[in-house]
Amino acid sequence: MKLNCSQSELNSALQLVSRAVSNRPTHPVLANVLLAADEGTGKLRLTGFDLSLGIQTSISASVQKSGAITLPAKLFVEIVSKLSSDSPLTLSSDEISQQVQLISKSGTYEVKGMIADDFPDLPLVETGTSLKLNPLLLSNSIKSTLFASSSDDAKQLLTGVNLTFDGYGIESAATDGHRLAVLNINNILSQLENENDLISSSKFSITLPSKSLREVEKFLSSCDHNQPINFFIDKGQVVFISDDEIITIRALEGSYPNYSQLLPDSFSNILEFDRKEFIASLERIAVLADQHNNVIKISTDSSDKLIKITTDAQDIGTGSESLPVSFKGESFQIAFNVRYLLDGLKVIESDLIKLSCNAPTTPAIFSPVNSNVNFKYLVMPIQIRN
């Protein structure tokens, strides 16, 4: 392999694909990135793959000799990132020694690699469901629910986000057992590959790991939002394709919990208030709440139009804030983990929010008011002991 390429383009590509390289690889070659140069296309293809998440991208290169090799990701990324960006780089490899020579205007480096044959093939879906999705809407569906997934590996399915495609829309949901975020978006399918896909995509569900979806969200943010991305799914493998970039994800196995049964049909108490003011009050109260157990209390009095937010950090101090509110219902008091509230409120894009609840021990729902976004954030309250 021998080629010339731009330092900045190579550096950007390496930064991207290295995010799919495992910190604790099960095989030495999985700590590497795969470089494959093609003289015919004038492209250098780079791939990172940890057997669950795979990222592949290509950059333009002047290829004198085609070839492929794998190089230690962390080392190669650090070397390339520190080279001068105002001069081209020359890469050449020796097929016998698996040594790669990297030449820039500032110096020459040699890195020991491993043969490309040892690198596992990136799984690409050739059959199954094929859709074209709006990247901006898909990004919003992931971002609005990802935060509510569990970080506990023992709850394997809950460490992912469940995506359900229904006709031309998508419902994304994530829960860690204490909270649940659900977003419905219509018209996310830009175009069906063929008429048969309308039937095959009428209703299907898949749960994807949150760690992998964080990379998908970054990938989607860099896409042209006016151009749909290709989405393929088959036998638990999902592939996203846009221009020269490919991300492949292995889905989590099992049936996601039936979360819809957790959402109450009706509420006896409904409060509407300003989202930004509520967040600001919570962040001030959280300074004290974080010192003890993160618990804050929200209380209302039907005789006035205020909600009161309080916290009591034992042996440290107390805090209290009041906010104007539009209130329907009876006087009540309910307690929450303040961090759970802030996580959910920050993804709601609405000036006004609604808190709907029944009793201090039953699920409460936060949702936007006067918005075309169908988002529900369920939070389980904390039992108050008087």
Image (tube, grey):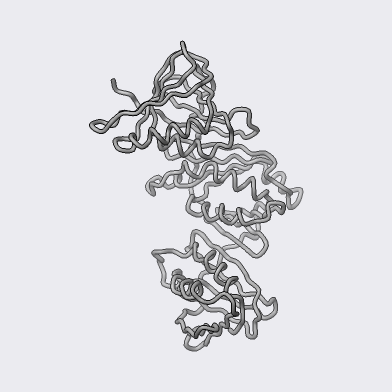
Q: Which residue, as the protein is rendered here, is positioned at the far top? A: 303
Q: In which quarter of the image is the C terminus?
A: top left
The answer to whether 305 appears left or right of 201 in the picture is left
Q: In this view, does 374 lie above or below 105?
A: above
Query: In the image as oriented, which residue stretches furthest toward the left?
Result: 315
* Residue sticking out furthest to the right: 195
The residue lying at 47 percent from left, 34 percent from top is 279
Residue 196 in percent (x, y) is at: 74, 48
Name which quarter of the figure residue 291 lies in: top left
- In the image, 346 versus 86, the foreground residue is 86
**Residue 124 figure quarter:** bottom right
Percent x, y of residue 229: 67, 54
Horizontally, is 354 left or right of 201 in the view?
Answer: left
Front-most of residues 147 and 7:
7
At 53% from the left and 43% from the top, the residue drawn is 162
Tell me residue 282's x, y (percent). Answer: 43, 33
Looking at the picture, tell me which residue is in the foreground, 335 or 310. Answer: 310
Quadrant where the N terminus sits is bottom right
The x and y percentages for residue 65 are 63, 85
Q: Quadrant of residue 29?
A: bottom left
Residue at 65% from the left image edge and 65% from the top image edge? 244
Is 93 placed above or below 259 here? Answer: below
Total number of numbered discs in the rendering: 0
Vertical comparison of 333 with 94: above or below: above
Left/right of residue 296 with respect to residue 249 in the rendered view: left
